[in-house]
Structure formats: C-alpha cells, structure tokens
Amino acid sequence: DKLMTPDNEWLYKNKDHGMMAASASLGLIQLWNVEEGLAQIDKFLYSSEEYVKAGAALAVGILSSGVRNDADPTLALLDEHINGDSHVMKCAACTGLGIAYAGSAREDVMELLLPIVEQENSGPTTML
C-alpha cells in the first residue's frame, strides 16, 4: 500500500495495458473501503492517459465489489463512460460495473449493460 499510493511515478513507468493493470490494482488495495478508495482513485479517472483512466474504472468496480451504498458512487462514476467514444474506457467501465454489481440482480445496471452486449460489433472477441 505504501509503495503504490504516495506518488504516482510508478504508474507511468508502464505502457498501455501495464498502466491499466497498475491503476486497477489500487482497487484491490482499497477493497471495500469505498469512501477513502474513491478519493484516491478518482483523480486517475481524469488522467490524460486513456489506459490509466480505464484502469481507474476497473479499480472503482473492484473496490466496490459486493458493497451496497445508498449513494451508489460506482454507478454514478462509471455510467458516463458506458456510451463514450473511447473503446478501452467503454470496456473498462462495463467490466467495472459487472464486477461491482455481480450477483446483485440490479435491473438498472442490466439495462445499461445489455444494449452494449447485444451489439453485433461487440463481444468477447472485440473487447480489447
């Protein structure tokens, strides 16, 4: 935890998928600590690097996995990226929502994800 969170230099020593994995790992470090974790991860959602933003979206889903919160910050943060222009960010936001709400039987989340899954040009072979 102390190695990865004080500064962010380590994050940018990787390329593309490495940056995504590194920023997504913050979700595991902050697992189930939604308030503090979102405060640390939120800044990466506004990074200029697309893969860092995608990793942050995954981190948001991971850290809130199985956590029920009336404010629903995960849905609020990832909803805007579901229909965005960036393919990498769209895939990460969908996966983050899937991780966060797995087993919850939330109709609203299903309604967000179903149109994307049903598209002819999407699917497991074209995701990343």
Image (cartoon, rainbow, N blue to C red):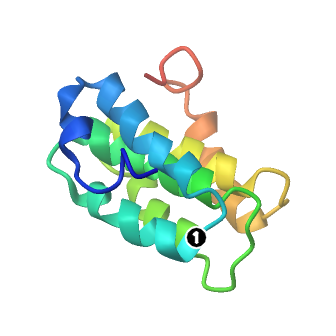
Residue sitting farthest toward the front: 2
The residue closer to the viewer here, 37 or 113, is: 37
Q: Is residue 50 above or below residue 5?
A: above
- Residue depicted at 58% across the width and 24% down the height: 123
Amino acid residing under circle 1? Val
- The quarter holding residue 15 reads top left
Residue 96 x, y percent position in the rendering: 56, 48
The residue closer to the viewer here, 102 or 117, is: 102
Query: Secondary structure under badge 1?
Result: helix
- The quarter holding residue 16 reads top left
Q: Is residue 66 above or below residue 1?
A: below
Q: Is residue 76 visible?
A: no
The residue closer to the viewer here, 9 or 82, is: 9
Residue 36 x, y percent position in the rendering: 49, 73
For mark 1, what is the residue? 34
- Residue depicted at 31% across the width and 47% down the height: 53
